[in-house]
Amino acid sequence: MAKTDGVLSARRNRVFLALTLALTALAGAQNSEAAPPSPPAPSRPAPPAPPPAASGSGASALQGIPGMDFSALSPAAQRELSTVFSDEFCYCGCPHTLGQCLKGHTGCQHAKRMARLAARQAAAGTPATDIILALSEYYASYRAPRQKLEVDPRMCMGDAKAPVTLVEFSDFECPYCGKARPVLEAFAKKNATKVRFCNVPFPLPMHANAVPAGQAVLWARDHGKYWEMHDAIFENAQRLSTATLVELANKIGLKGAELQKALQAGTYAQELEKYKSMGSLANVRGTPSLFFNGRFHDIQLGLTEDTLSHALEDETVWRANNNAWAAD
Protein backbone atom coordinates (compact mmCIF):
# COMPACT_ATOMS: atom_id res chain seq x y z
CA MET A 1 0.00 0.00 0.00
CA ALA A 2 2.81 2.33 0.84
CA LYS A 3 4.32 1.53 -2.55
CA THR A 4 1.03 2.27 -4.30
CA ASP A 5 0.69 5.53 -2.40
CA GLY A 6 4.18 6.49 -3.45
CA VAL A 7 3.42 5.83 -7.10
CA LEU A 8 0.21 7.85 -6.97
CA SER A 9 1.99 10.66 -5.20
CA ALA A 10 4.64 10.75 -7.91
CA ARG A 11 2.02 10.82 -10.67
CA ARG A 12 0.17 13.65 -8.96
CA ASN A 13 3.36 15.61 -8.75
CA ARG A 14 4.05 15.17 -12.49
CA VAL A 15 0.48 16.19 -13.44
CA PHE A 16 0.64 19.18 -11.14
CA LEU A 17 3.95 20.22 -12.64
CA ALA A 18 2.66 19.89 -16.22
CA LEU A 19 -0.46 21.85 -15.33
CA THR A 20 1.61 24.55 -13.67
CA LEU A 21 3.86 24.89 -16.73
CA ALA A 22 0.85 25.08 -19.09
CA LEU A 23 -0.83 27.79 -17.03
CA THR A 24 2.40 29.75 -16.86
CA ALA A 25 2.84 29.60 -20.66
CA LEU A 26 -0.77 30.67 -21.21
CA ALA A 27 -0.38 33.65 -18.91
CA GLY A 28 2.80 34.71 -20.70
CA ALA A 29 1.11 34.53 -24.04
CA GLN A 30 -1.78 36.73 -22.83
CA ASN A 31 0.52 39.36 -21.30
CA SER A 32 2.98 39.64 -24.23
CA GLU A 33 2.74 42.48 -26.95
CA ALA A 34 1.36 41.38 -30.26
CA ALA A 35 3.99 41.36 -32.95
CA PRO A 36 3.53 44.26 -35.32
CA PRO A 37 2.04 43.19 -38.62
CA SER A 38 4.34 43.09 -41.58
CA PRO A 39 4.31 46.43 -43.33
CA PRO A 40 2.29 46.34 -46.54
CA ALA A 41 4.21 46.45 -49.76
CA PRO A 42 4.50 50.02 -51.01
CA SER A 43 1.81 50.73 -53.57
CA ARG A 44 3.00 51.54 -57.06
CA PRO A 45 1.67 54.72 -58.63
CA ALA A 46 -0.89 54.13 -61.31
CA PRO A 47 0.52 54.56 -64.80
CA PRO A 48 -0.41 57.91 -66.36
CA ALA A 49 -3.48 57.87 -68.53
CA PRO A 50 -2.60 57.88 -72.21
CA PRO A 51 -3.14 61.24 -73.94
CA PRO A 52 -6.32 61.53 -75.95
CA ALA A 53 -5.85 60.37 -79.45
CA ALA A 54 -5.17 63.26 -81.78
CA SER A 55 -7.65 63.84 -84.52
CA GLY A 56 -6.43 62.33 -87.70
CA SER A 57 -7.29 65.31 -89.89
CA GLY A 58 -9.12 67.96 -87.87
CA ALA A 59 -12.10 67.26 -90.10
CA SER A 60 -14.57 67.01 -87.19
CA ALA A 61 -14.11 70.68 -86.30
CA LEU A 62 -14.77 71.64 -89.91
CA GLN A 63 -17.98 69.69 -90.28
CA GLY A 64 -21.48 70.98 -89.72
CA ILE A 65 -20.73 74.52 -90.92
CA PRO A 66 -23.71 75.69 -92.99
CA GLY A 67 -22.85 76.47 -96.58
CA MET A 68 -19.15 75.58 -96.29
CA ASP A 69 -17.30 72.41 -97.27
CA PHE A 70 -13.60 71.88 -96.58
CA SER A 71 -13.43 68.20 -97.48
CA ALA A 72 -11.29 68.91 -100.55
CA LEU A 73 -8.42 70.08 -98.31
CA SER A 74 -5.66 67.64 -97.47
CA PRO A 75 -5.65 66.15 -93.93
CA ALA A 76 -2.70 68.39 -93.00
CA ALA A 77 -4.47 71.50 -94.29
CA GLN A 78 -7.62 70.51 -92.39
CA ARG A 79 -5.65 70.23 -89.16
CA GLU A 80 -4.17 73.72 -89.61
CA LEU A 81 -7.53 75.22 -90.54
CA SER A 82 -9.18 73.53 -87.55
CA THR A 83 -6.61 75.20 -85.27
CA VAL A 84 -7.35 78.58 -86.83
CA PHE A 85 -11.08 78.08 -86.29
CA SER A 86 -10.57 77.25 -82.60
CA ASP A 87 -7.88 79.87 -81.79
CA GLU A 88 -8.78 82.95 -83.86
CA PHE A 89 -11.77 85.22 -83.23
CA CYS A 90 -14.12 86.42 -85.93
CA TYR A 91 -13.39 89.99 -86.98
CA CYS A 92 -17.09 90.89 -86.96
CA GLY A 93 -16.69 91.81 -83.30
CA CYS A 94 -18.72 89.01 -81.73
CA PRO A 95 -17.24 87.30 -78.62
CA HIS A 96 -16.79 83.98 -80.43
CA THR A 97 -14.00 82.13 -82.10
CA LEU A 98 -14.20 81.85 -85.86
CA GLY A 99 -15.40 78.25 -85.61
CA GLN A 100 -18.10 79.13 -83.07
CA CYS A 101 -19.26 82.05 -85.17
CA LEU A 102 -19.49 79.90 -88.29
CA LYS A 103 -21.66 77.31 -86.53
CA GLY A 104 -23.67 79.46 -84.11
CA HIS A 105 -23.87 82.84 -85.84
CA THR A 106 -24.84 81.53 -89.24
CA GLY A 107 -25.93 84.90 -90.59
CA CYS A 108 -22.44 86.39 -90.22
CA GLN A 109 -21.03 86.95 -93.70
CA HIS A 110 -17.77 88.22 -92.24
CA ALA A 111 -16.99 84.82 -90.72
CA LYS A 112 -17.55 83.06 -94.04
CA ARG A 113 -15.21 85.43 -95.89
CA MET A 114 -12.61 85.06 -93.15
CA ALA A 115 -12.91 81.27 -93.30
CA ARG A 116 -12.43 81.26 -97.08
CA LEU A 117 -9.31 83.39 -96.73
CA ALA A 118 -7.90 81.09 -94.04
CA ALA A 119 -8.75 78.00 -96.10
CA ARG A 120 -6.77 79.32 -99.08
CA GLN A 121 -3.76 79.80 -96.85
CA ALA A 122 -4.10 76.33 -95.35
CA ALA A 123 -4.41 74.81 -98.82
CA ALA A 124 -1.14 76.52 -99.76
CA GLY A 125 0.62 74.77 -96.87
CA THR A 126 0.76 77.72 -94.47
CA PRO A 127 0.87 76.67 -90.78
CA ALA A 128 -1.92 77.80 -88.46
CA THR A 129 0.29 80.24 -86.51
CA ASP A 130 1.24 82.07 -89.71
CA ILE A 131 -2.35 82.08 -90.95
CA ILE A 132 -3.55 83.65 -87.70
CA LEU A 133 -0.84 86.31 -87.88
CA ALA A 134 -1.65 87.09 -91.51
CA LEU A 135 -5.37 87.35 -90.74
CA SER A 136 -4.71 89.69 -87.82
CA GLU A 137 -2.53 91.97 -89.94
CA TYR A 138 -4.97 91.87 -92.85
CA TYR A 139 -7.99 92.99 -90.83
CA ALA A 140 -5.95 95.49 -88.80
CA SER A 141 -4.95 97.17 -92.07
CA TYR A 142 -8.54 98.31 -92.60
CA ARG A 143 -8.39 100.46 -89.47
CA ALA A 144 -4.89 101.79 -90.14
CA PRO A 145 -4.42 105.28 -91.65
CA ARG A 146 -4.83 105.28 -95.43
CA GLN A 147 -2.18 106.54 -97.82
CA LYS A 148 -2.94 109.42 -100.17
CA LEU A 149 -1.68 108.29 -103.57
CA GLU A 150 -2.07 110.70 -106.46
CA VAL A 151 -1.53 109.00 -109.80
CA ASP A 152 -1.84 110.46 -113.28
CA PRO A 153 -5.16 109.09 -114.62
CA ARG A 154 -3.41 108.14 -117.89
CA MET A 155 -1.52 105.52 -115.87
CA CYS A 156 -4.80 103.88 -114.80
CA MET A 157 -7.30 101.53 -116.39
CA GLY A 158 -10.95 100.93 -115.51
CA ASP A 159 -13.82 103.21 -114.56
CA ALA A 160 -12.57 106.46 -113.05
CA LYS A 161 -15.68 106.42 -110.82
CA ALA A 162 -15.13 102.89 -109.57
CA PRO A 163 -15.57 102.57 -105.78
CA VAL A 164 -12.13 100.97 -105.37
CA THR A 165 -8.77 102.15 -106.68
CA LEU A 166 -5.94 99.64 -106.73
CA VAL A 167 -2.46 101.15 -107.00
CA GLU A 168 0.57 99.01 -107.78
CA PHE A 169 4.17 100.14 -107.31
CA SER A 170 6.37 98.06 -109.61
CA ASP A 171 9.93 97.72 -110.86
CA PHE A 172 10.44 96.72 -114.50
CA GLU A 173 13.37 94.44 -113.63
CA CYS A 174 11.63 92.80 -110.67
CA PRO A 175 10.79 89.16 -111.55
CA TYR A 176 7.90 89.13 -109.07
CA CYS A 177 6.38 92.17 -110.74
CA GLY A 178 6.70 90.38 -114.07
CA LYS A 179 4.73 87.43 -112.71
CA ALA A 180 2.15 89.69 -111.09
CA ARG A 181 1.50 91.76 -114.22
CA PRO A 182 -0.83 89.38 -116.11
CA VAL A 183 -2.71 88.51 -112.92
CA LEU A 184 -3.30 92.15 -112.01
CA GLU A 185 -4.25 93.23 -115.51
CA ALA A 186 -6.68 90.33 -115.97
CA PHE A 187 -8.25 91.12 -112.59
CA ALA A 188 -8.58 94.81 -113.49
CA LYS A 189 -10.17 94.10 -116.86
CA LYS A 190 -12.60 91.60 -115.38
CA ASN A 191 -13.69 94.10 -112.71
CA ALA A 192 -13.43 97.30 -114.78
CA THR A 193 -16.60 98.81 -113.30
CA LYS A 194 -15.66 97.96 -109.71
CA VAL A 195 -11.96 98.75 -109.57
CA ARG A 196 -9.69 101.34 -111.11
CA PHE A 197 -6.18 99.94 -111.52
CA CYS A 198 -3.18 102.27 -111.55
CA ASN A 199 0.47 101.42 -112.08
CA VAL A 200 3.35 103.49 -110.69
CA PRO A 201 6.99 102.87 -111.66
CA PHE A 202 9.15 102.38 -108.57
CA PRO A 203 12.72 101.42 -109.56
CA LEU A 204 14.64 99.63 -106.83
CA PRO A 205 18.28 100.57 -106.13
CA MET A 206 19.69 97.23 -107.32
CA HIS A 207 18.01 97.48 -110.75
CA ALA A 208 19.88 100.07 -112.79
CA ASN A 209 17.88 99.56 -115.99
CA ALA A 210 14.60 100.08 -114.13
CA VAL A 211 15.32 103.84 -113.99
CA PRO A 212 15.42 104.50 -117.78
CA ALA A 213 12.55 102.01 -118.15
CA GLY A 214 10.48 104.04 -115.68
CA GLN A 215 11.26 107.24 -117.57
CA ALA A 216 10.43 105.56 -120.88
CA VAL A 217 6.98 104.51 -119.73
CA LEU A 218 6.23 108.06 -118.55
CA TRP A 219 7.31 109.34 -121.95
CA ALA A 220 5.03 106.81 -123.67
CA ARG A 221 2.17 107.97 -121.44
CA ASP A 222 2.54 111.48 -122.82
CA HIS A 223 2.23 109.95 -126.26
CA GLY A 224 -0.94 108.03 -125.41
CA LYS A 225 0.58 104.57 -125.02
CA TYR A 226 1.41 104.05 -121.36
CA TRP A 227 0.05 100.49 -121.06
CA GLU A 228 1.44 99.39 -124.42
CA MET A 229 4.94 100.47 -123.36
CA HIS A 230 4.40 99.08 -119.86
CA ASP A 231 3.63 95.60 -121.22
CA ALA A 232 6.37 95.70 -123.85
CA ILE A 233 9.02 96.55 -121.26
CA PHE A 234 7.94 93.71 -118.96
CA GLU A 235 7.99 91.28 -121.85
CA ASN A 236 11.61 92.24 -122.49
CA ALA A 237 12.73 92.65 -118.88
CA GLN A 238 15.72 90.34 -119.31
CA ARG A 239 17.40 92.54 -121.90
CA LEU A 240 16.63 96.09 -120.87
CA SER A 241 18.91 98.85 -122.15
CA THR A 242 18.48 102.20 -123.81
CA ALA A 243 18.72 100.53 -127.21
CA THR A 244 15.99 98.04 -126.25
CA LEU A 245 13.70 100.82 -125.02
CA VAL A 246 14.15 102.70 -128.29
CA GLU A 247 13.39 99.52 -130.21
CA LEU A 248 10.23 98.91 -128.18
CA ALA A 249 9.03 102.48 -128.75
CA ASN A 250 9.28 101.91 -132.48
CA LYS A 251 7.41 98.60 -132.22
CA ILE A 252 4.39 100.16 -130.50
CA GLY A 253 4.16 102.88 -133.12
CA LEU A 254 6.10 105.70 -131.44
CA LYS A 255 9.33 107.43 -132.48
CA GLY A 256 12.20 105.75 -130.74
CA ALA A 257 14.61 108.54 -131.65
CA GLU A 258 12.50 110.99 -129.63
CA LEU A 259 12.52 108.66 -126.64
CA GLN A 260 16.31 108.43 -126.85
CA LYS A 261 16.58 112.22 -126.75
CA ALA A 262 14.24 112.39 -123.73
CA LEU A 263 16.29 109.79 -121.88
CA GLN A 264 19.53 111.58 -122.63
CA ALA A 265 18.08 114.89 -121.45
CA GLY A 266 16.55 113.37 -118.30
CA THR A 267 13.20 114.87 -119.22
CA TYR A 268 11.25 112.51 -116.94
CA ALA A 269 13.83 112.01 -114.20
CA GLN A 270 12.20 114.47 -111.82
CA GLU A 271 8.72 113.02 -112.25
CA LEU A 272 10.03 109.52 -111.68
CA GLU A 273 11.67 110.70 -108.46
CA LYS A 274 8.34 112.18 -107.41
CA TYR A 275 6.68 108.78 -107.72
CA LYS A 276 9.55 107.12 -105.89
CA SER A 277 9.13 109.61 -103.04
CA MET A 278 5.38 108.97 -102.95
CA GLY A 279 6.05 105.26 -102.60
CA SER A 280 8.68 105.76 -99.91
CA LEU A 281 6.27 107.92 -97.90
CA ALA A 282 3.73 105.10 -98.19
CA ASN A 283 6.38 102.76 -96.71
CA VAL A 284 6.98 100.87 -99.94
CA ARG A 285 10.09 98.74 -99.39
CA GLY A 286 9.75 96.20 -102.15
CA THR A 287 7.84 95.42 -105.31
CA PRO A 288 5.18 94.72 -106.20
CA SER A 289 3.39 96.72 -103.49
CA LEU A 290 -0.38 97.05 -103.66
CA PHE A 291 -2.82 99.52 -102.11
CA PHE A 292 -6.62 99.20 -102.12
CA ASN A 293 -8.04 102.69 -101.64
CA GLY A 294 -4.78 103.65 -99.93
CA ARG A 295 -4.76 100.56 -97.71
CA PHE A 296 -1.63 98.44 -97.94
CA HIS A 297 -2.44 94.93 -99.13
CA ASP A 298 0.11 92.33 -98.07
CA ILE A 299 0.75 89.99 -100.99
CA GLN A 300 1.91 87.33 -98.52
CA LEU A 301 -1.77 86.37 -98.50
CA GLY A 302 -1.25 85.38 -102.11
CA LEU A 303 -1.43 87.21 -105.42
CA THR A 304 -4.14 85.39 -107.33
CA GLU A 305 -7.48 86.33 -108.81
CA ASP A 306 -9.18 84.77 -105.76
CA THR A 307 -7.22 86.78 -103.19
CA LEU A 308 -7.60 90.00 -105.17
CA SER A 309 -11.34 89.41 -105.53
CA HIS A 310 -11.55 88.73 -101.80
CA ALA A 311 -9.82 92.03 -101.01
CA LEU A 312 -12.06 93.86 -103.47
CA GLU A 313 -15.16 92.38 -101.82
CA ASP A 314 -13.97 93.33 -98.33
CA GLU A 315 -12.97 96.83 -99.45
CA THR A 316 -16.36 97.36 -101.08
CA VAL A 317 -18.18 96.31 -97.89
CA TRP A 318 -15.92 98.52 -95.77
CA ARG A 319 -16.48 101.56 -97.98
CA ALA A 320 -20.25 100.99 -98.29
CA ASN A 321 -20.56 100.94 -94.49
CA ASN A 322 -18.68 104.23 -93.95
CA ASN A 323 -15.32 102.66 -93.24
CA ALA A 324 -16.56 100.00 -90.83
CA TRP A 325 -17.77 96.43 -90.97
CA ALA A 326 -21.49 96.08 -91.45
CA ALA A 327 -23.30 94.53 -88.50
CA ASP A 328 -24.81 91.10 -89.15
Image (cartoon, rainbow, N blue to C red):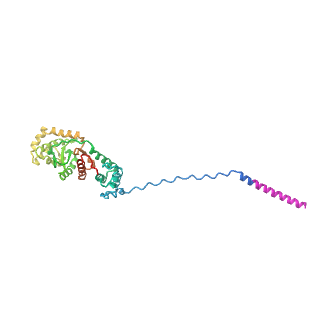
Asked whether 217 or 19 is in front, the reply is: 19
Q: Is residue 288 visible?
A: no
Q: Is residue 20 left or right of residue 51?
A: right
Q: Point out residue 308 in the picture as x, y percentages from the top left corner.
A: 23, 50
The quadrant of the picture occupied by the N terminus is bottom right
Q: Which residue is at the front of the view, 255 or 12?
A: 12
Counting from the top left corner in percent of width and height, residue 274 is at 18, 38
Is residue 17 in the magenta section?
Answer: yes
Question: Can you see residue 199?
Answer: yes
**Count of marks overlaid on the render:** 0
Asked whether 107 falls inside the magenta stretch, the response is no
| Residue depicted at x 20% and y 40% | 278
Q: Main secondary structure of the magenta part?
A: helix
Kindly give the residue lying farthest to the right in the view shown.
1
Q: Nearer the viewer, residue 208 or 27?
A: 27
x and y percent of residue 133 in the render?
Answer: 32, 47
Residue 264 x/y as whole percent = 12, 39
Q: In the visual, does 321 lie left or right of 31?
A: left
Q: Which residue range is magenta in the image? A: 1-24
